[in-house]
Amino acid sequence: AGSCSHVCTSHDARVCARDWFLFIDVCSVAQKAFPNLRCSEVSQAGVPAAVEERAELRISHDSKADPPTCEAEPPPHGVRLCACVPAVNKRDIVTTLGETAVSDVVKKVLEELDASDRLELSRAKLSGATHQVPVEADGAQLSTRLLTDVSAGRVSFFKSQVTETCEATCKTQALKCSPRWFGVVNRCEVLMAAFPQAPDGTYL
């Protein structure tokens, strides 16, 4: 039992492959691991998961709009189905702490941006004027979507190796680089959290 991050780490120090949930969070696939359980669609991050005492196999109601996360715990008395891959680049504790700090700063930035965007949209609606708030293809406010993702642990921030592209860095962690986040991470306060300055003037 435990989150997929914990499960994968305990198996030869592997990492949870978040992008694979799209393929395993499907009734027919999950039932290969947990046969004879009936599928039940839920809106929870800790899926796919089997709850044996209820003969229930929980999968996402919509794995694209509300995807499972590696960090989510399984439901009570349940176990999760996880996709684990070898960790190509193991990350030291200093790097890991820095990346956690980035997530915290990004969340604060998005909270302020989300409030500002909501205010601008409200004013534009009242006045009939156009607005400059970024929206997604379905019309949803981008800052709200990003804030929801970072709050739910559906996004991770990794520092690349020297000369390494973001695409390559994400791939080593079994993830994909998402360009929609560059507008948020390309801010001074976020970069300072990722690359704090040492007493000697060098950046960590």
Image (cartoon, rainbow, N blue to C red):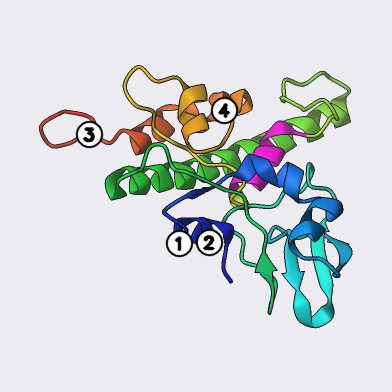
Residue 145's tag is: none
Between the residue at mark 4 and the residue at mark 2, the CA separation in whole angstroms equals 24 Å
Q: Quadrant of residue 117?
A: top right
| The disc label shown at residue 197, or none | 3
Nearer the N terminus, badge 3 or badge 2?
A: 2
Q: Dot 1: what SS?
A: loop
- State the residue in front, 11 or 54: 11
18 relative position to 90: left or right:
right
Mark 4 / mark 2, whichever is N-terminal: 2
Asked if the residue at tag 2 contacts the one at tag 1, i.e. Cβ–Cβ closer than 8 Å, the answer is yes
User: Quarter-wise, where is residue 77 in the image?
Assistant: bottom right
Q: Which residue is mark 4?
A: 177
Residue at 85 percent across and 55 percent down: it is: 27
Which of discs 3 and 4 lies nearer the camera? The answer is: 4
- Magenta span: 141-150
| Residue corresponding to mark 1 | 10
User: Of discs 1 and 3, which sits in the foreground?
Assistant: 1
Residue located at (73% from left, 60% from top): 33
Task: Report the residue at 38% width, 37% height from top.
Answer: 89
Badge 2: residue crowd in 10 Å (few <14, some 14–19, many ≥20)? many
Between marks 4 and 1, how big is the CA–CA gap? 26 Å
Give, as a three-letter code, the residue at label 4.
Answer: Cys
Q: Is residue 159 left or right of residue 43?
A: left
Whole-angstrom CA distance, mark 3 to mark 2, is 35 Å
27 left or right of 189?
right
